[in-house]
Image (cartoon, rainbow, N blue to C red):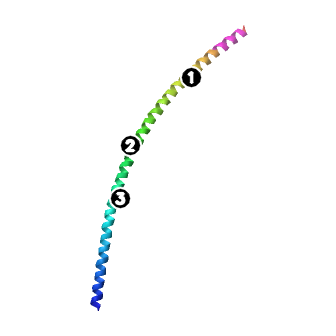
Amino acid sequence: MECLMKAQENRFRNLIEGIEQKQAEKLVFHSKCYDYEIQKLRDVAKERHELFIEQVTTMKESVDLKIVELKSELSKEVQKMEQNYTSVHGKVYFIALLSLN
C-alpha cells in the first residue's frame, strides 16, 4: 500500500513539475511577445520624439526671427523718439531764448 502511495506521489510530483515547466515556458513566450511589442512602442516613441524635436527647432527659429524683427522695430522707434525729443528740446530751448530777449 505504501508503495502505491509513493508511486502516486511521484506521479503527482511529475505532473506538477510538468505543469510548472509548461507555465514557465508560456511565461517566457509571453515575455518575448511583450518584448516585441515594447520594442515597437519604443520605435514609435523615438520617431515621434524626433518629429517633436524637429518641430520645436523650427518654432524656435521662427520665434528667434520674430524677436530679431521686434528688436529692430523697437530700435527704430527709440531712434525716432530720441530725434523727436532732440527736436522738441531744441525748439523749447529756442523759444526760451527768444522769450528772454
**Residue 55 among magenta residues:** no
Q: Nearer the viewer, residue 77 or 87?
A: 77
Q: Nearer the viewer's eye, disc 1 or disc 2?
A: 2
Q: Nearer the viewer, mark 2 or mark 3?
A: 3
**Which quadrant holds the N terminus?**
bottom left
Does the magenta portion include 97?
yes
- SS of the residue at dot 1? helix
How far, Cα to Cα, is label 2 from label 3? Answer: 24 Å
The amino acid type, in three-letter code, at marker 1 is Glu
Q: Could you say whether the residue bearing mark 3 is in a helix, strand or loop? A: helix
Give me the C-alpha separation between circle 1 and circle 2: 41 Å
Tag nearer the camera, 1 or 3: 3
Q: Circle 1: is it few (<14), some (14-19), or many (20+) Cα within 10 Å?
A: few
Residue at image mark 3: 34
Q: Is residue 6 above or below residue 34?
A: below
Q: On the picture, is 53 further left or further right than 1? A: right
Task: Report which residue position mark 1 lands on.
Answer: 77
Which kind of residue does numbered mark 3 sit on? Tyr
Q: Position of residue 9 (x, y in %)?
A: 30, 84
Residue 2 in the image: state x and y as whole percent.
Answer: 29, 91
Where does the image place residue 7, in percent across and percent down from the top left?
27, 85
Range covered by the magenta-colored residues: 90-99
Residue, disc 2: 50
Tag 3 or tag 2, which sits nearer the N-term?
A: 3
Q: Residues within 10 Å of mark 3 (few under 14, many from 20)?
A: few
Q: Residue at x 28, y 82 (%)?
A: 10
Asked where in the image residue 79 lies, by quadrant, the reply is top right
**Counting residues from the N terminus, which is met first, the one under dot 1 or under dot 3?**
3
Residue shown at 33% from the left, 69% from the top = 23
CA–CA distance between discs 1 and 3? 63 Å
| Front residue (pair 52, 18) | 18
